[in-house]
Amino acid sequence: MPQASPTVSVNQGFSTSFIKLEYSRPSMRGRTIFGQLLPYGDLWRTGANQATKITFGEDVYIDGQEIKAGSYAIYTIPGENEWTIIFNKGTDNWGSSGYKKSEDVLRFNAAVHHPEHTYETFSIRIENITNNSCNLVLNWENTKLVIPIEVHNNERIMAYLDKKLKSDKPPYAAAADYYLETNQKLDDALKYISMAIKENPKAFHLYWAKAQIYQKLGQHKKAVAAAKKSAEKAKGSAFEVEYAQHYKHIQTLK
């Protein structure tokens, strides 16, 4: 028979590792949830059935506090205007049964948002992903909570690139892309993307990366020329229209 609160497992790539979610998803089914089915001020398993579990593949920072890589149960205490969010070691608990405050690793408050859209089924999602941040978003009924997550990975990634760039197979394109994305060492980014193009002169995406680096360096004419070349190289591929649009857009910049 269909589950009343079906389980879901989400493994989201993030930073240099992943975030994994395992939880059960209850639905409203005509009920008023917060303040009635789930009274304000009571501990909630943040889902249904077994404790909701989140696994971090690397150390993260939430509410300015470090959480080590590993698995944690997510508990919450709903309130009308803010919730208490709890990360706890009790990952094998059945819901809130077996919860021990002494096993909390993090406890903080998060503001409640009330979107116009009604969410019939409870959900936890990972949104707004960047190189070093994302949001853990909880939705149910007319309630939404956003929990920012950060990682301090730049020093580690830079050290990795420095080492690999001295190897037999230097990751020129990867280094250039990362420097471009994080707006650092742009002169080196230009050097490495040129080396990557020399190794793979047909790769139109490399010319587009070079155009963006030139643009950030304030060399607009060279940026336009590189973008034009990327559009020409992309002709006949599935990306022809996309790179033609890139070329058209960069011409409007100064």
Image: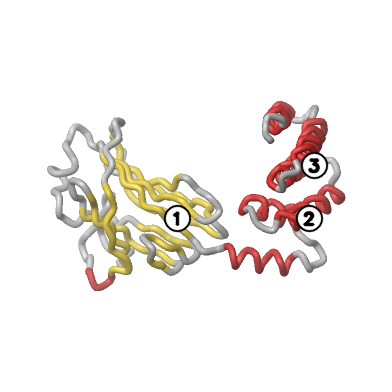
Res 38 visible: yes
Q: Which of marks 3 and 2 is in front?
A: 2
Horizontally, is 69 left or right of 238 in the view? left
Colour setting = secondary structure
Q: Where is residue 16 in the image (x, y as percent from the top left)?
A: 57, 59
Res 4 visible: no
Question: How many marks overall?
Answer: 3
Q: Which of marks 3 and 1 is nearer the N terminus?
A: 1
Q: In which quarter of the image is the N terminus?
A: top left
Q: Position of residue 231 (x, y in %)?
A: 77, 31
Asked if disc 1 and disc 2 are in contact, CB closer than 8 Å, the reply is: no
Q: In which quarter of the image is the C terminus?
A: top right
Give residue 162's quadrant in the image.
bottom right
Q: Position of residue 70 (x, y in %)?
A: 43, 66
Residue at the image point whose x is 24% and y is 57% from the top: 84
**What residue does disc 2 label?**
192
Q: Which of marks 1 and 2 is in front?
A: 2
**What residue does disc 3 label?**
203
